[in-house]
Image (cartoon, rainbow, N blue to C red):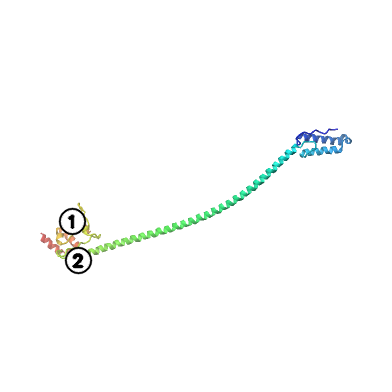
């Protein structure tokens, strides 16, 4: 009859399982094949139970349970690890929730910022349109000012022309200018002759023609400069040019003839 095996540490050793399993099989074979009366049924049952316990790491009488303690420690460590993982999951969930809240707040702030930027863009576009309108109005105003300036220049020209005509008419009433000297007839730009320099060296200004005698005594060059200043073309001889200048001043031809004859 088969003898009970001697088990060794650790409990879960494959050798222990093989010994227990072989012992149970031998007992079972004796029952079935050769010596059924010599095998105690209780011993057979216990051999099978022992093999099953060893396979499932269940404590067995007579076998040190160091492996069980080690296994329990491993299981405890696994439990602690599971607890730690669970705590980490909880913390991670809290952090994820906080992160989701922060992301939602950030998205809301970005949306608000986008809205503000869009509003700013709209205001800038409106400002650009107003600036363009203002530029157009300024351009229109410039055009109007230019028109006014041109009109004023025309009015000034008319005023100068009318002033010259009035002075000529006044000078025409003063005969030869001996009793009442002639007034200066302004040039077309409104300036008086004695305030304008002649185009000669020395910065000499036009002389004041006070009498018909002054006209007769004027050098030919001065007569020519006078005619140019009044915008009169220099044509004819010297006498014709003096006569043209006399008309510009308002001197009657007869007074100029008399003064010329006297000068001769």
- SS for tag 2? helix
Q: How many marks?
A: 2
Question: Measured from the top left, where is residue 144 in percent x and y?
Answer: 35, 61
List the residue tagged with mark 1.
222
Residue 14 placed where, x, y %?
76, 35
Question: Which residue shows up at 16% across the image and 56% down it?
Answer: 220
Picture disc at residue 129: none
Residue at 18% across / 65% down in the picture?
Answer: 172
Q: Residue furthest right?
A: 37
Where residue 28 appears, as percent x and y from the top left, is: 84, 36
Picture coordinates of residue 210, whole percent (x, y) = 17, 61
The answer to whether residue 220 is seen in the rendering is yes
- Residue carrying label 2: 170
Q: Is residue 22 above or below residue 139?
A: above
Q: CA distance from mark 2 to mark 1?
A: 23 Å
**Mark 2 Cα shell of 10 Å, populated few (<14), some (14-19), many (≥20):** some
N-terminal of the pair, mark 2 or mark 1, is: 2
- Which quadrant is home to the N terminus? top right
Looking at the picture, does residue 93 appear above or below residue 209? above
The residue at the point 27 percent across, 62 percent down is: 156
The residue nearer to you, when weighing 175 against 253, is: 175
Q: Nearer the viewer, mark 2 or mark 1?
A: 2
- Element type at mark 1: helix
Is 22 located above or below residue 107 in the figure?
A: above
The quadrant in which the C terminus is found is bottom left
Q: Quadrant of residue 157?
A: bottom left
Q: Quadrant of residue 131?
A: bottom left
């Amino acid at each position: 009859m088969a003898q009970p095996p001697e088990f060794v540490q650790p409990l879960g050793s494959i050798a222990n399982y093989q010994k227990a399993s072989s012992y149970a099989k031998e007992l079972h074979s004796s029952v079935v094949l050769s010596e059924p009366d010599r095998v105690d049924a209780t011993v057979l049952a216990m051999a099978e139970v022992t093999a099953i316990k060893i396979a499932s790491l269940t404590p067995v009488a007579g076998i040190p349970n160091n492996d069980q303690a080690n296994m329990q420690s491993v299981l405890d460590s696994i439990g602690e690890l599971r607890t730690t993982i669970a705590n980490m999951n909880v913390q991670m969930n809290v952090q994820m929730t906080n992160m989701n809240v922060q992301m939602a707040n950030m998205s809301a702030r970005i949306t608000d910022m986008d809205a503000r930027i869009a509003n700013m863009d709209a205001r800038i576009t409106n400002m650009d349109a107003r600036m363009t309108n203002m530029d157009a109005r300024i351009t229109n105003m410039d055009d109007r000012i230019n028109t006014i300036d041109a009109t004023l220049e025309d009015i000034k020209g008319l005023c100068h022309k009318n002033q010259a005509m009035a002075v000529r008419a006044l000078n025409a009433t003063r005969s030869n200018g001996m009793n009442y000297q002639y007034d200066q007839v302004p040039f077309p730009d409104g300036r008086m002759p004695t305030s304008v320099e002649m185009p000669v060296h020395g910065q000499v200004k036009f002389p004041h023609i006070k009498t018909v005698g002054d006209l007769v005594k004027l050098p030919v060059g001065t007569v020519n400069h006078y005619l140019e200043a009044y915008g009169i073309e220099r044509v004819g001889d010297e006498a014709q040019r003096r006569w043209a200048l006399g008309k510009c001043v308002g001197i009657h031809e007869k007074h100029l003839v008399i003064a010329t004859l006297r000068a001769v």
